[in-house]
Image (cartoon, rainbow, N blue to C red):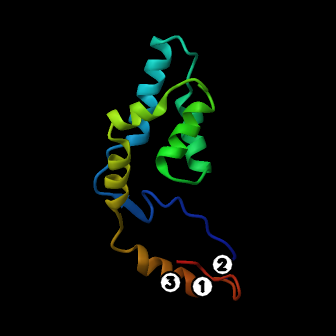
Amino acid sequence: PIAAVLFDMFGTLLFMQRKSLPWTKLFGVVADLAQEQELGVFSQSKASLFVQTNDGPPCEIAAMAVNAQLPTFEVDPLLAKLDFIKEVELEASSVKLYDDSLQALKRLSARLVVGRGLKL
């Protein structure tokens, strides 16, 4: 029997029909503005990791990810200018299961050790 399985959902079970990368765009603009305004170095990879490991409303998480590195950076006007929340919602609403994902998960669930079921 199978005791454990770990999936990277995107590209394995799910895909985005409309991949607009609003987080990547936001962090790229922040990095450019931080350099232009001499606010310090902004690590897009650290910001991305922050987003992936914290939960909350997108605008709050975005502000926290930016302000963790650049405490004086005014995030809200940039979020509005980039229409960030709309872009995040559009991208998220375009997430779909691959045609065979649900069937594969059901087959896998049937093979898992009793008492450690697969949560779908």
Q: Nearer the viewer, residue 104 or 18?
A: 18
Q: Which residue is mark 1?
A: 111
Cβ atoms at labels 2 and 3 below 8 Å apart: no
- Residue 9's x, y, as percent? 49, 61
Cβ atoms at labels 2 and 1 below 8 Å apart: yes
Side (left or right) of 72 relative to 105: right
- Residue 48's x, y, as percent? 54, 40
Seen at 38% across and 57% down, the residue is: 92
54 relative to 47, above or below: below
Q: Secondary structure at mark 3?
A: helix
Cβ atoms at labels 1 and 3 below 8 Å apart: yes
Q: Quadrant of the N terminus?
A: bottom right
Amino acid at dot 2: Ile
Q: Secondary structure at mark 2?
A: loop
Quarter-of-image position of residue 101: bottom left
Q: Residues within 10 Å of mark 3 (few under 14, many from 20)?
A: few
Seen at 48% across and 12% down, the residue is: 37
Amino acid at dot 1: Arg
Separation of disc 1 and disc 3 at Cα? 7 Å
Q: Residues within 10 Å of mark 1 (few under 14, many from 20)?
A: some
Q: Nearer the viewer, residue 51 or 13?
A: 51
**Residue 2 tag number:** 2
- Residue 51's x, y, as percent? 55, 45
Q: Residue furthest left?
A: 18
Separation of disc 2 and disc 3 at Cα? 11 Å
Separation of disc 2 and disc 1 at Cα? 6 Å
Q: Earlier in the sequence, mark 2 or mark 3?
A: 2
Seen at 43% across and 40% down, the residue is: 23
Side (left or right) of 91 relative to 108: left
Q: Which residue is mark 3?
A: 107
